[in-house]
Image (spheres, rainbow, N blue to C red):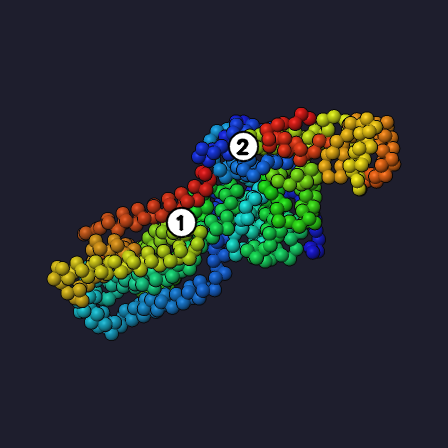
Amino acid sequence: MEIRDVSKWYGTYPALRDVSLDLPTGIVGLLGPNGSGKSTLIKALLGLVSVDAGSGRVLECRWPEDVRILRDQVGYLPEDDCFIEGLQGIESIQMMARLSGLKSTEALRRSHEVADFCDMGQERYRTVDTYSTGMRQKLKFAQALVHDPQWLILDEPTTGLDPAQREQLLDRIAVLAHEKGKSVLLSTHILHDVQRVCDCVVILAAGQVCVVDSLENLQRPTQAGLQISVVSDVERLHQTLANQGIAVERSGPGELRVAGQGDAILQAIWRASRQSNVLIQRVAPSRNSLEQAFLDAVSMKTPSP
Amino acid sequence: MPILDVGYRPWDGTRTPRWTRGLVVAETGIRLVWRNAWLKRILLFMTIPALVVGAFVGAFEQTLDQSSAREAMQAMLRTPRARAVAERAGVDVQKVAKDPAQARHFAWSYLLFVLFRYPQAFGMILVLGLVAPRLVSYDLRSKGYLLYLSRPLTPAEYIAGKAGIVFFLLFMMAAVPSLLIYVAGLFLSTDSWAIAQTWDLPLRILAATLVLMIPTTAVALAMSSLTQESRYAGFAWFAFWVIGAVSYQVLWLASQVRRGMDPESMEILGEYNPWMLFSPYETLGYLQMQIFGLTRTDDWVWGPWILVVGTSVVGYALAYWRVARILKV
């Protein structure tokens, strides 16, 4: 997908301002605070809201001119709780398949396959207005998948899911992207979801693109260092390390960040642990956390990878 | 748990043409409304008047060559009302009194018109009041429109699909029984020339059905699209018919009284008066009367046609605007 100079105004409020994006294949995380323009961008890509300016190409289609053709190749999971009252789950999936051009019998067969893939069980025969939030998310995911789209646009797909269901859904997304060759645009607030499955991250803030980079780059530390997690008195270990002349700082509750890497630093850490009698739980190369990158981007400070 | 879980499989079949996707909206909607038990009961109940009219057509055909039929026809045409209706339809009363078979076209048309005018029109109001208010308002409330419009559907196709649900019901209610009555009449007729005399009736039935379903569907969809609460749309639907009918009756009676005429003595069926434009029921009835050839041909009135076409255009445009506006925000 490549789009150029996309702008969208709601009256005097700019929802999107000169957004230009070249998205790679794989799973792309779309991050941003509330009101940053994520959902507007997604709806604009599908032609569900009209844009004031901008053009581009999406899946070999001219955008926004050919959005109707594009919609056959895109599976969209909306953030909104949307359903057709009175239809059973399986009928809802079949209807979406037929709207995307599958013949009736083929659509039903495919709907059952996708319902199995999404672990909908016998719930598929209940009317959708009786579904729980989690079931509705599964249903929307199945509806997005049923016509085998090349590109999945998932707007807050894990909302309302319990932890186990959330992990399963993320596994399914990873399978679709890495084993079935789908491209995925995953819009979410949940950084864990992005860290878990995404290859690339786009951060939107105030309707502008702040960051487009691979997750690996965003998590790479700005300088070499070690992240230490301790079980008990972190302040005592901090003091002991500082007394040894090692550059150390608090990086979170029960966590220290030590500048530099290598055996000498490691030996100094173990020594300080013994001296201060503080048990170290974990030592790992420090990373520039995605959360920090997100906060930097939101405050319009793009981190240097 | 599935007996066999094949995991995710790609699909590369042939897609149906894009222009057919709107039919899915209609088909899904029909499947949904058909689950309404009250709808089935009403439709079943509405077969009774159709059977009665069919029996009249059958009795007319079976008794044509009996002298008692001729006498009955002569007796009927002696009544001023029947004579007025027949003359207005261009029937040669003298000729028909001698040969009742000459009245076949008029008799069938009149019976079919009565079926359209009374049981089917009331049934239409009831069925659409039951079904139509939910068509768009439910989607607006549950954001179902996002599901439709995220697929290759335009708002116009969506509205056309929703209209297709109502068209289907009205076609089943109005056109199908009338066409069956016509076919039954042909089979029951002992005169092989019956088809030559009545060949135009199926076309008139289809035209009368179109006049019934196009404007009423437009009004129903417009009302449904204006609110997320289907009960408000339902209330507005019934109010539309009741207020129109009451306004017409009051205005017409007042005008007759002012002109010093006795309303009881007036034959209003088939006579055009401008007050009927206040009543959708009367307006549609007059148009159907024109379609069945039961009005005077020398004073063709355009007012009801303009009103119905205008209402239809405004109704569909309003429904389209409400749905399309979602995409224009």
The C terminus of chain B: image quadrant? top left
What amino acid does circle 1 point to?
Leu
Residue visible at 34% across and 48% down in the picture = B312
x, y percentage for residue B306? Answer: 27, 47
Can residue A155 be seen at all in this image of the molecule? yes
Residue visible at 42% across and 64% down in the picture = B43
Residue at the extreme left of the image, as rendered? B260
Number of the label disc, if any, that sits on residue B226: 1
Near-viewer residue (B204 or A297): A297
Q: Quadrant of residue A197?
A: top right
Q: Identify the secondary structure beneath mark 1.
A: loop
Q: Which residue is mark 2?
A: A207
Left or right of A133 in this view: B219? left
Near-viewer residue (A270 or B255): A270
x, y percentage for residue A192? Answer: 68, 40
Residue visible at 23% across and 72% down in the picture = B72
What amino acid does circle 2 point to?
Gly
How crowded pointer 2 is (Cα within 10 Å; few <14, some 14-19, many 20+) is rated as many
Left or right of A40 in this view: B156? left
CB of mark 1 within 8 Å of CB of mark 2? no
x, y percentage for residue B164? Answer: 43, 51
Q: Write down the chain letter for disc 2.
A: A
